[in-house]
Image (tube, rainbow, N blue to C red):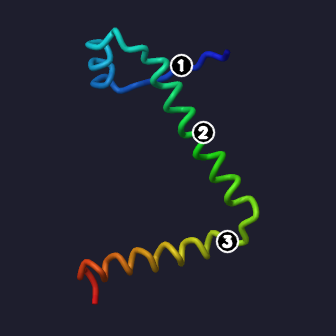
Amino acid sequence: MTNVTLAVPEDLHKIMQKHKDIKWSEVARQAIWEKARKLELMDKLLAKSTLTEEDALKIGRKIKHGIAKKHDLVK
């Protein structure tokens, strides 16, 4: 297994120090695995996609506009 060094903010470190019974390396490992699985799924879903980045941006703008309209933020 490979070792990785992780930097955390001081306030997070203080919380971690209060809970020394927690295996923080295992918490980090699980979080990294979860993110990696999501990325792998995304890669599989997008592997055959013909959408361009511009297409995705246009769709995103339409969705945002629809949400704003639904909440009466635009007319």
Residue drawn at the location 23% of the way across and 82% of the way down: 72
Vertical side of 55 occupied by 23: above or below: above
Q: Nearer the viewer, mark 3 or mark 1?
A: 3
Q: Nearer the viewer, mark 2 or mark 3?
A: 2
Vertical side of 60 occupied by 20: above or below: above
Q: Tell me the tag on residue 15.
A: none
Dot 1 falls on a residue whose secondary structure is loop
Percent x, y for residue 2? Answer: 66, 17
Where does label 3 land, which residue?
A: 52
Upstream in sequence: badge 2 or badge 3: 2
Upstream in sequence: badge 2 or badge 1: 1
Vertical side of 6 occupied by 42: above or below: below
Q: Mark 2 to mark 1: distance in Å?
A: 18 Å
Percent x, y for residue 30? Answer: 51, 28
Q: Quadrant of the C terminus?
A: bottom left
Upstream in sequence: badge 3 or badge 1: 1
Residue drawn at the location 38% of the way across and 80% of the way down: 66
Q: Residue furthest left?
A: 72
Where does label 2 land, which residue?
A: 36
Q: Tell me the tag on residue 5.
A: 1
Q: Is residue 54 left or right of residue 17?
A: right
Q: Mark 3 to mark 1: distance in Å?
A: 36 Å
Give amino acid for label 3: Thr
Q: Quadrant of the N terminus?
A: top right
Q: Is residue 39 left or right of residue 70?
A: right
Is the C-beta separation of discs 2 and 3 under 8 Å?
no
Give amino acid for label 2: Ala
The part of the image, by quadrant, that contains residue 34 is: top right
Q: Mark 2 to mark 3: distance in Å?
A: 23 Å
